[in-house]
Image: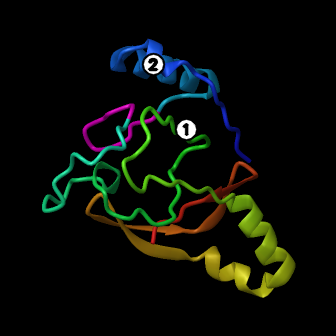
Amino acid sequence: GFALLRGLPLDHYDEDQINTIYYAIGLYMGQPVTQNQKGDLLGQVINIGDISKKDTRVYETNLYLPYHNDPSDVVGLLCVREAKQGGMSSLVIAAAIYNEIITRRPELLEVFYRPFCYVHLGEDEMSPIFSFHEGKLSCRYLR
């Protein structure tokens, strides 16, 4: 599922204070994980990246970012400023997709348990889309 929190008075704070508030909210929900190879614990979604560089993350550009999931239990997004254009976000619940496959085409589920190759941060990796860890459904999806 997801939750939407509205009404944080962000105009009362500078950027460092906003980051601290956001980080504190994240700590309430769980253990932070790094966002990139640099070890950043907060990632700024802003068009500042150089698309000619291999290590530029898509969220640092104005390029389209297709559906994917982040390897964590909780993901947070904080909108500080409205984008001049674009900037739309959408969410899909992986467990709901899994349940739809079970309901509509359970014979296809075994395909999603097989390892798929994908490129992440310039490295080839293998992972099934769906798996179970400690009895809980896990999803790893990158186009």
Instruction: Choose the circle earlier in sequence order: 2 or 1.
Output: 2
Colour mode of the rendering: rainbow
In the drawing, what numbered circle is on residue 11?
A: 2
Which element type, helix, strand or loop, lies under badge 1? Answer: loop
Q: Residue at x 66, y 31 (%)?
A: 5
> Badge 2: few (under 14), some or many (20 or more) residues near its Cα, within 10 Å?
few
Which residue appears farthest toward the left when viewing the image? Answer: 52
User: In which quadrant of the rendered view does residue 20 lie?
Assistant: top left
The answer for how far apart the CA atoms under marks 2 and 1 are is 20 Å
Q: Position of residue 65 (x, y in %)?
A: 41, 62
The answer to whether the residue labelled 2 contacts the one labelled 1, judged by CB atoms less than 8 Å apart, is no
When the figure is inspected, residue 103 is found, relative to residue 61, above or below; the finding is: below
Give the side of residue 123 with respect to residue 72, left or right. Answer: left
When the figure is inspected, residue 20 is found, relative to residue 115, above or below; the finding is: above
In reply to whether residue 35 is colored magenta, the answer given is yes
When the figure is inspected, residue 24 is found, relative to residue 69, above or below; the finding is: above
Q: Residue at x 45, y 35 (%)?
A: 33
Q: Residue at x 61, y 43 (%)?
A: 73
Give the side of residue 83 with respect to residue 23, left or right. Answer: left
Q: Residue at x 32, y 33 (%)?
A: 40
Which residues fall within the magenta stretch?
33-42
The main secondary structure of the magenta stretch is loop
**Residue highlighted by disc 1:** 76
Q: Position of residue 118 (x, y in %)?
A: 40, 71
Give the side of residue 56 with respect to residue 34, left or right. Answer: left
In the drawing, what numbered circle is on residue 35?
A: none
Residue type indicated by callout 1? Gly
Residue type indicated by callout 2? Asp
> Badge 1: few (under 14), some or many (20 or more) residues near its Cα, within 10 Å?
few
Which element type, helix, strand or loop, lies under badge 2? Answer: helix
In reply to whether residue 128 is colored magenta, the answer given is no
